[in-house]
Image (cartoon, grey):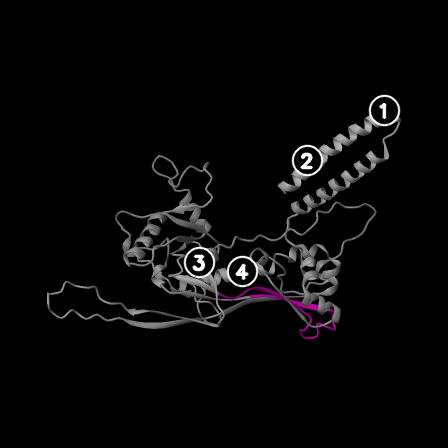
Amino acid sequence: MDELLKQLAALQAQIKASQEKAAEETKKYGTMLEETKNSLTGLQTQVDAIDKKMAERHSGDGDQPSLIETLKANDSIARMVKDGSGRASIQLKGAEVARLFERKTTITSAAVGTATTGVLQIDRIPGITQEARQALTVRDLLAARPTAMQVVDFVKVNAAPKIASPQVEASDKAENAVTFTSASEKVRTIATWIPATKQILADFGELAGYLNSALPYYVNLEEELQLLSGDSTGENLNGLITQSSDFSGSLLSPAAGWTKLDVIGRAIQQITVAKEIAPTFVILNPNDYWDIRLTKDGFGRYILGDPQIPVTRPQIFGLDLVPTTSIASGSFLVGSGNAVAAEIRDRMEMTVEISTEHSDYFVKNMVAVRAEKRLALIVKRAASFVNGTFTTSP
């Protein structure tokens, strides 16, 4: 955008100079010279092109290709369109993950609805205003790396060696011992799909802008819920809260009383006393976050700082404070983002596939669009995570 603004300023300066030159020529010859006229026309064409680019940047997608552009650039989709059948696959990475569809009802012309035409034109804002969506933050707290297998196995210490002791000179040294055990986690699949007609995709251009961001978001939302609370039954992940240690209410003092800040501090203490990996984050519901953020001392001063001071990354006791509605109000999780404590293993990144090969979709002019990803959550040091509620009584 900065580069476009620089180019626009330079062109405007040239146009001004050419206009002044045209004024002199008109005064001298009665009309501007053909060369000056052509120069002004060319400069204005360049300005119009830059204005168009800037408008596209402001429309929301910026440098991101639209759904239609993505489809046109995909060879497998081009073959499917040419042959009239088959299947196509699109793999999305990084920022491209925020793409495509989410609905459980076939999108048709009837579902979208039609407007009543009239004599007077209406002013319509382009695009579709999307529904409210929460920020997804849990994955970013954990280490992640790929795997090529469907099961991830790891070895951990079952019974650690005993502490060493002073030894008598020239005597047999005390023997030590250690045992190990193995554990494993299966790669799980998180997916959703949507049917749509070819007609509505072709006739309702604004639909593409909405579909560019929806379906993968809802796959990632389920991933976040699974990372936190998956109960390991069926195809659910074995989540952090499920495997973590319960907060010990005995660390609180009934006589002294306690606040939500005290609960978090004692949870950190519990992990430290267990000699586990130092925690790096606290996950809690926004309701509890604001209760803590608005805590005041006896003089009415905010304990966590002046509200007028911008806070880009809130922290408490040196830990990142992460509010999210993915955890229930009144609950919290204290844990570590260290890969030794837990990590995500990605078997397949977000993939969106489009195909007519479903039931009788080919003869009905319909397509099925599916978004999915495959991953495993490996919690190696479960005691490095503590979960509890702020209403815990000692």
Disc 1 to disc 2, C-alpha distance: 27 Å
Q: With 333 as the anchor, is 348 left or right in this view?
A: right
Nearer-N-terminus badge (3/1): 1
Q: Is residue 133 visible?
A: yes
Write the start and end of the magenta stretch as one range.
346-372
Residue type, mark 1 in image: Lys
Residue 9 marker: 2
Q: Residues within 10 Å of mark 4 (few under 14, many from 20)?
A: many
Residue placed under numbered mark 4 in the picture: 220
Q: Residue furthest bottom?
A: 359
Residue placed under numbered mark 3 in the picture: 142
Q: Residue at x 78, y 40 (%)?
A: 42
Q: Residue at x 67, y 59 (%)?
A: 70
Nearer-N-terminus badge (2/4): 2
Disc 3 to disc 1, C-alpha distance: 72 Å
Q: With 51 as the anchor, is 30 left or right in this view?
A: right
Q: Main secondary structure of the magenta part?
A: strand
Residue 6 vs 373, above or below: the answer is above
Mark 3 vs mark 1: give the one in front. Answer: 1
Residue type, mark 3 in image: Leu
Q: Nearer the viewer, residue 129 or 282?
A: 282
Disc 2 to disc 3, C-alpha distance: 45 Å
Residue type, mark 4 in image: Asn
Residue placed under numbered mark 1 in the picture: 27
Q: Nearer the viewer, residue 194 or 98?
A: 98
